[in-house]
Image (spheres, coloured by chain):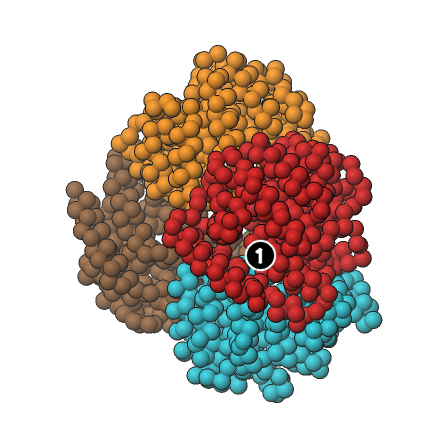
Chain colours: A cyan, B red, C orange, D brown
C-alpha cells in the first residue's frame, strides 16, 4: 500500500476508449488521443471511467488499454485507472494491472447492482483501500450506482491512509460545497468535479480539478478555464465558461438516450481523424442523420473555440 | 398583467410561517421575524414557500399571512408570495390576494401530484402568467414536484412578458450553470438559488441572489456572503461560506425526516424569542431531546457567527 | 365519528369529473355517467380521486360535484369521496361536505408535497380519522405521493375505529399480498385494488373489490370479472380478464404523458354521448389525430366487449 | 444456437451461493443444498442470480459453481445459469461455460450501469440471444438495473428463436398481468415470477412458475403452493399462501439493508447445517444479535410449516 497520498490538480480527462470493432482496441486511436490531450496541457489522464465505457468492456480489453495508455503517456502526466466493478475481486485484479503499469492511482465507484447502506459502503471501501496497491479515489455517481457516498461517509473514509480523494459526478452543488468545507484545511485529499458544466464554479470555491468528458475533444478550453478559476479570476472564468458550455449545448443532445454524450464525443473525434467511433455493446453507433448533426456541431464549435 | 419585469437582487429569505396552534397564525411572531430580517439587510421577503409550509396551511391562514406580512413590511422591501397549488384556480385566487396587498411578485412551482410533460408545463405556466396580476417567478423543485422545469422550457417561458425569473431548488449545479449561460445577456430575468449551501458559488458565476432558508435565523451572514460573491471577492466569499455552512451542519440534521431543517429553524427561532415553534400537520414539533440539541447548536452558532 | 366500519365490496369506479369548461361542472354529464354506472351494476361510486382530477379542481367545483353526485345516486349505491389534500384542514372541510351529503366514506392519500416518514404518516392519519365525520379509507399511491403507506403502518392504522380500509394503487403485488395475509381474519377492513389490470388476480386471493378507472366506460365487464373472481371461478376469471385487458391495451396508450389514460376515458365517454371531454388544467384535450385514434379504439372495444 | 425453446414449469429456486471464505466456494454446502432442493420436489435450479450474489463473485468462483452444481444435480432437474453482466462479452463467456456443463438455459437481466433505452435493449438482447449457445430467459429487475423491459419490448424479443421466456422481479402486478394476456396463446414462452409473495396469485392467472428465494430454505411449501395454484384450487392456494408468507414475514426483515433477505436465508441454512453463512463483499455476515433473531425465526417457521 502506498501511503503517500496524491496531490493531483487540474484537468484530468476521462478518456473515451477507442475501439475498432467488437472487443478490438483502436491502438492508433489511443496513441493519437493521448498525444492530443498531453500536448494541450492536461494534468492527468483517467481511463476506464463511465465515459470510457468501462462497464461494457471485457477484462482482456481493459488490460490492453491500461498497458497501451501507460506506454503512450511515457510518464509525462499521471495515469488514473477506473476499477469500478460489482465484484471487489475483479476490482483488485484491475488495480494490480494498473500498479504493474505504473499508474498513479485507481478510482472506484460503489458496487452498482444492489443499493448499499452507508456502513456497508464504508466496509467495502476500507477493504478495497487495504488491498489496493495504489492510492484510491472514491467516485460518487448515484445516478448510475444508486448509492450516494454521503458526506459523513467521505469524512470517515478520508482517514484511511490509502484513500486520496473523491470525484463527484452527482451534479449536486450542495453535496460538493459541503465536501469543500469539510476538507478546507487538508491539502492531501483531492476533490474533483465530474460534470464539466459546473466544474469552474466549484474550482472557484476550492475544488482541485475536473474530470471533464468534453476535454477529450477540446482539451485546451478546459485547461484554460480551470486555470482562470484556480487563479480566482472571476471575470475570465465566466467568459471562458460561456465558451466552454457550447460543447455540451451543441454536442451532447444529439441522440435519444443516456449514452448520447459519449456518442457525440466519439463521433466528433472520429470526424477529426483522432480515433474510430465504434462503441461497445449495448450502445450503438450514430447513423447518418446523427453523424450529419455532429459534423455541423463540430464545425460551429471549432470556429467558436478558436476565437 | 404587469409587464414591467422585476429586477430583484440579493437575499430574499423564504419566511417560515409562525403559528401558535392548529390553523392559528402567530401574528407577533410574524412581526418580530419581519423586523429581524429587514434590520439585518435582506433584499426581499418570500412567504408561502416550501420552508413556509405553504402546502400544509388552510387558505384562511394563507390570506391572513399575506395581509399581515405586507402590513409589517411597510414597503421597505419587496414581498414575494408563493402561489404553488395543484389547482390553477386556487393559485390565481392567492395571486389576487397578493396583488391586493401590493406584493411585488408571485412564485409558483409546477403542480405536484401528476408528473407533467414539458409541453403540459409550458401551457400551464403560460395560462398562469396570463391570469396573474403580478409578475410570476418559476420555482424549480423536482424533488417535491416530480417535474423538472427543463432548460429549454425555461427558455420558452422567459419570452412571456409576465414571467420574471426562476428560483431553482434542484441543487443541480449543471442545470443552474446552463441557465446562467442561457440568460447571460439578459438583465430582466432573475435567477435565484434555493439551497443556501451552493448559493455563493452560483452568485460568483452570475446568479442574482439566494432564497436561503437559514437566513430566517442568521440573516446577516447570508447578506454578507451574497455581497462578497456579487462583488467577485473570491477569498472573502470562501471565508464567509465556511462560516455560513455551520448553520446547516449544526442545525438541519437534528430529527429524522425531510422536514428536519424546518423544525430546526423554527425551534431555534422560538429559543431566541422571535416566534413560536408550532408546525402545521403533518409535521410535528421537536420533543425535549431534539430541543436540547437545537439549544446546543444555537449556542455554538451564535458564538461562531458573532466572530 | 362513525365507528361502524364499512364493509364495502365489489367494483367502485373512480368517477371521472365531467366538465364543460374551466371551472364549470357538466351536470348533465354527471347524471348520465351515474346512471350508466348504476344500471350496469357497480357496487359504489368514488368521486374526487386521481382519475377524477381532484387535485386540479377548485374547492367550489368539488363541493358542487359532491352535492350533484349524491343527488343523482339517490342512495342506490354508497358514495365515497376523495379528500386528499396537502392541507389537513382542507381535507376535513371536504369531509364535512361529504358527510352533509350523506356519503358513505371518505378516502385520503398521504399529503403529497413533502415525502413523509412513517411515524409522521401515522400521526397524520390518526388526526384525520379523529376529525373525519365519516369512515376513512387509506389510499396508497406512492408514484404520486412519494410516500408508501408501509404494511406495518397499515397494521397500526387499522386499529383506529374510524379507519375502514385501504385502496392500493401501487401496482405492487408483494405489498398487496402481504396486506391480504395481515387482514385474513378480519372482515371489517376493506382491501381494494386500484390498477384494473391486476384487480382480478388480487380478488382471487381475497381482495374485496376494485376501484377500476376503465369501469367509467365499460362498467359491465368489470362487474362480471369481479364476480367471477370473487366466486373463485378461475377459468371464467381468466377468460374475462383477457377481454377486459383490451380496454387498457387499446385506450390508455394514446397520448404521451401520465394523463393519457384519463384523456382516453374522457374522450371515449364524450364520443358515446355520455359527457363532455373537457379536462381541468394542467391537462389539455386530445386534438383531432388522437381523437381519431380513440374513435377507432372505441369501435374495436364495443365489438369485442359485446361478444 | 438451440432453437428448441424450453417449456420449464414450476418452482425453480434461485440458489444462494454457499461460500466458505473470500472467493472460496463451500462445495459441501452446494451438494447439501442441491440435495435438499431436489428431494423436496423442485422443478429446476437457477444459479448466479441476484439471490446467488452473482454480481459480487469472481469469474473463477462462477465457473466453479456452474461445474459443481451441474455435477451434483446429475441431470435430475434442469439447471439455469445467470449470465447477467454489464459486459456482453463476459456474459457470453459464462454462457459458454454453462453450455459445456449441459445447463438447460441461461438468464440475463439488462446491463445495469447505464439506464438503457428500449431500442438499445432490443439490440442488446438480440445480440446476446444470437451468440448464446443455450436458450435465453429475459430477467426483468428494474430496481437493480434501472431499466424496465417494457411489455412491447418483450413482445418483440419473444419472436427470437433463442429467447425462451422471462423472469419478472419487478413486483408489478400490472406488468405481469399484461404479459400473461400477451402470451395467452403461446405455450413456448415461459413466464416466471420472482417475488415469492405474489407467485401464487400470478400462477392462478396463468404464470408458469416461480423463482422463489425462500425455496432455498423451505422448498416444500413452495412446491405445494405452486401445485395448488397451477391446479386452480383457490382455497388451498390461499391457505398455503398464508403459511408461506410467514417465511418473508419472520426472516427477511432482520437487518437493515436491501441484502437482509439473503443474509436471513444464508444464516438460517447455516443454522440447519446445510451450508456456511459466509457472504461475498460488499455484504457482511450477521453478528450475534441478528443471528439470535434468525434462530428464533427458524424455530417458529419450522413449527409452523411442519403443521
Q: Position of residue A243 (x, y in %)?
A: 76, 66
Give the vertical position of C223 relative to D209 (above or below).
above
Q: Position of residue B261 (x, y in %)?
A: 51, 52
**Dot 1 falls on which chain?**
B
Q: Residue furthest top?
A: C74
**Is residue D215 or residue B12 the one in the foreground?**
B12
Give the vertical position of B51 relative to C208 (above or below).
below
Secondary element at tag 1: loop
- Residue C136 appears left or right of D231: right
Residue A141 appears in view: no
* Quadrant (top left/top right/bottom left/bottom right) for the C terminus of chain D: top left
- Residue B76 appears left or right of D126: right
Q: Position of residue B278 (x, y in %)?
A: 48, 42
Q: Position of residue C41 (x, y in %)?
A: 45, 17
Give the vertical position of D287 relative to D143 (above or below).
below
**At x 77% / y 58%, what residue is drawn?**
B184
User: Hey, which quadrant is residue D127 in on the image?
Assistant: bottom right
User: Hey, which quadrant is residue B118 in on the image?
Assistant: top right
Location of mark 1 (residue): B218
**At x 64% / y 36%, what residue is drawn?**
B67
Count of residue discs: 1
Assess disc 1: are there few (<14), some (14-19) or many (≥20) residues with their C-alpha within 10 Å of its C-alpha.
Answer: many
**Is residue D127 or residue D3 the one in the foreground?**
D127
**Is residue B49 or residue C301 the one in the foreground?**
B49
**At x 32% / y 56%, what residue is drawn?**
D255
- Residue A44 appears left or right of D16: right
**At x 72% / y 38%, what residue is drawn?**
B102
Residue B180 appears in view: yes
Amino acid at each position: 500500500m502506498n501511503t503517500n497520498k496524491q496531490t493531483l490538480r487540474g484537468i484530468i480527462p476521462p478518456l473515451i476508449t477507442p475501439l475498432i470493432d467488437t472487443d478490438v482496441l483502436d491502438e492508433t486511436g489511443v496513441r493519437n488521443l493521448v498525444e492530443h490531450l498531453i500536448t494541450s496541457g492536461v494534468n492527468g489522464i483517467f481511463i476506464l471511467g463511465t465515459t470510457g465505457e468501462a462497464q461494457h468492456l471485457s477484462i482482456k480489453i481493459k488490460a490492453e488499454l491500461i498497458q497501451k495508455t501507460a506506454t503512450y503517456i511515457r510518464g509525462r502526466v499521471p495515469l488514473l485507472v477506473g476499477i469500478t466493478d460489482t465484484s471487489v475481486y475483479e476490482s483488485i485484479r484491475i488495480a494490480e494491472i494498473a500498479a504493474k503499469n505504473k499508474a498513479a492511482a485507481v478510482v472506484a465507484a460503489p458496487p452498482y447492482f444492489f443499493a448499499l447502506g452507508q456502513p456497508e459502503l464504508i466496509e467495502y471501501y476500507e477493504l478495497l483501500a487495504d488491498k489496493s496497491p495504489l492510492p484510491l479515489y472514491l467516485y460518487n455517481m448515484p445516478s448510475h450506482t444508486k448509492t450516494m457516498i454521503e458526506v459523513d461517509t467521505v469524512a470517515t473514509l478520508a482517514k484511511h491512509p490509502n484513500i486520496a480523494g473523491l470525484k463527484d459526478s452527482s451534479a449536486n452543488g450542495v453535496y460538493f460545497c459541503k465536501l469543500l468545507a469539510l476538507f478546507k484545511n487538508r491539502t492531501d485529499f483531492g476533490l474533483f468535479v465530474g460534470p464539466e458544466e459546473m466544474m469552474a464554479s466549484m474550482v472557484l470555491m476550492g475544488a482541485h480539478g475536473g474530470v471533464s468528458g468534453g476535454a477529450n475533444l477540446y482539451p485546451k478550453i478546459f485547461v484554460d478555464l480551470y486555470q482562470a478559476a484556480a487563479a480566482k479570476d472571476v471575470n475570465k472564468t465566466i467568459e471562458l465558461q460561456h465558451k466552454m458550455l457550447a460543447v455540451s449545448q451543441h454536442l451532447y443532445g444529439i441522440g435519444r438516450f443516456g449514452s448520447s454524450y459519449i456518442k457525440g464525443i466519439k463521433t466528433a473525434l472520429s470526424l477529426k481523424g483522432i480515433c474510430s467511433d465504434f462503441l461497445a455493446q449495448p450502445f450503438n453507433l450514430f447513423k447518418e442523420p446523427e453523424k450529419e448533426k455532429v459534423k455541423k456541431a463540430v464545425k460551429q464549435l471549432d470556429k467558436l473555440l478558436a476565437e
